[in-house]
Image: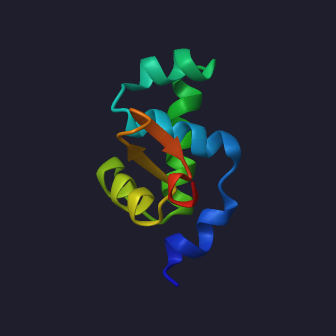
């Protein structure tokens, strides 16, 4: 088990929701509006998730998140889903 995999269980439901918004390739301002929080809070929470999963940038975060099946795109649903691997 790698470090990210072992720590992914520490992610909250809100963390996973932010990961979905990130996967939809929208910017921090849009994430903040959709998540009903400030841009500063969005950035702080993304930094926390990156720290938990031991990554240094958002690109690496995307790779780890996809490799752990925390979020995935499902064409039949035409959207990104949280924990889609188990669905």
> Which quadrant is home to the C terminus?
bottom right
User: Residue sitting at 44 percent across and 57 percent down?
Assistant: 65
Where 74 falls versus 33 (above or below)?
A: below
Where 16 falls versus 37 (above or below)?
A: below
Instruction: Identify the residue at the far left of this view.
Output: 59
Position of residue 42 measured from the top left corner of the image (x, y, whole percent): 54, 31
Instruction: Identify the residue at the far front of this view.
Output: 76
User: Residue sitting at 54 percent across and 37 percent down?
Assistant: 18
Instruction: Identify the residue at the far bottom of this view.
Output: 1
Position of residue 33 measured from the top left corner of the image (x, y, whole percent): 54, 15
Whether residue 7 sits left or right of residue 84 in the image: it is right
Position of residue 72 measured from the top left corner of the image (x, y, whole percent): 42, 50
Colour setup of the view:
rainbow
Where 11 falls versus 75 (above or below)?
A: below
Number of numbered discs visible in the structure rendering: 0
Q: Quadrant of residue 30?
A: top left
User: Residue sitting at 57 percent across and 60 percent down?
Assistant: 86
Position of residue 74 measured from the top left corner of the image (x, y, whole percent): 40, 44
User: Residue sitting at 39 percent across and 55 percent down?
Assistant: 61
């Amino acid at each position: 088990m790698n470090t990210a995999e072992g720590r992914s269980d520490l992610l909250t439901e809100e963390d996973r929701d932010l990961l979905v918004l990130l996967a939809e390739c929208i910017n921090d301002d849009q994430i903040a509006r959709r998540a009903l929080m400030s841009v500063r809070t969005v950035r702080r929470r993304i930094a926390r998730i990156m720290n938990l999963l031991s990554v240094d940038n958002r690109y690496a975060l995307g790779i780890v998140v996809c490799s752990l099946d925390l979020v995935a795109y499902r064409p039949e649903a035409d959207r990104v889903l949280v924990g889609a691997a188990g669905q």
